[in-house]
Image (cartoon, rainbow, N blue to C red):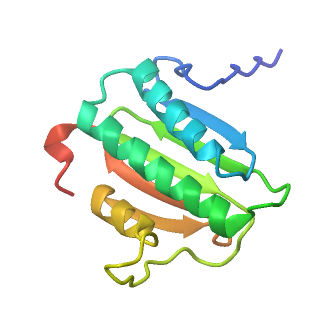
């Protein structure tokens, strides 16, 4: 008789043999008002998982805010395309992924000091150890350590 698979749900750990892994995944309407919702969801998940220093929580919330904002502005604002937010915490590291409908690669851009926007990926670059795109450029991801001694990547 085959063994039934173990159901996995966000925030539930795997059996003891597997590493600690906490995951949350949501889909948000592609509307600017949902950026605030994404920040609250990120902060709430990190609080629920526990053990993440406050500075890492702050950096994570800012990264989520910037990536979701970019996804909404450049990946489907005014369309029915949802923005996906996925966060995975493995104990020592946090992976943030934001998916939208745009296949153009996210990129840093030069901005004038008088411009009020356009610095989102610069902030992500400064706060995360690394970032990039995958899934035909529809997913922008960022990775950062969750232990203070690993902050200088």
Q: Quadrant of residue 103?
A: bottom right
x and y, in percent, of residue 130 in the image: 36, 62
User: Count the marks: how many?
Assistant: 0
In the rendered image, which quarter contains the N terminus?
Answer: top right
Q: Would residue 126 appear left or right of 43 to someone viewing this image?
A: left
Q: Is residue 149 above or below residue 121?
A: above
Q: Is residue 78 above or below residue 109?
A: above
Residue ID at (35%, 79%): 114
Residue at the limit of the structure toward the front, as seen here: 114
x and y, in percent, of residue 152 in the image: 16, 54
Q: Quadrant of residue 138?
A: bottom right
x and y, in percent, of residue 101 in the image: 75, 65
- Relative depth, front residue between 128 and 6: 128
Q: Would residue 128 appear left or right of 68 to someone viewing this image?
A: left
Q: Would residue 150 appear left or right of 37 to someone viewing this image?
A: left
Residue 94 in view in this figure: no
Q: Quadrant of residue 72?
A: bottom right
In the rendered image, which quarter contains the C terminus?
Answer: bottom left
Residue ID at (49%, 49%): 65
Residue ID at (33%, 46%): 59
Residue 131 in view in this figure: yes
Residue ID at (71%, 51%): 31
Q: Would residue 109 appear left or right of 59 to someone viewing this image?
A: right
- Relative depth, front residue between 121 and 73: 73
């Amino acid at each position: 008789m085959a063994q039934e698979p173990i159901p996995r749900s966000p925030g539930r750990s795997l059996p003891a043999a597997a590493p600690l892994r906490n995951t949350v995944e949501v889909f948000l309407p592609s509307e600017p008002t949902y950026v605030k919702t994404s920040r609250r969801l990120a902060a709430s998940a990190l609080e629920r998982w526990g053990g993440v220093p406050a500075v890492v929580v702050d950096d994570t919330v800012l990264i989520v805010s910037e990536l979701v904002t970019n996804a909404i502005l450049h990946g489907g604002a005014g369309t029915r395309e949802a923005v996906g937010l996925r966060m995975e915490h493995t104990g020592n590291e946090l992976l943030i992924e934001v998916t939208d409908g745009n296949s153009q690669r996210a990129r840093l851009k030069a901005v004038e000091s008088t411009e009020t926007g356009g610095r989102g990926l610069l902030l992500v670059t400064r706060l995360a150890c690394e970032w990039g795109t995958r899934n035909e450029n529809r997913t922008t991801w960022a990775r950062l350590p969750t232990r203070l001694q690993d902050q200088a990547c």
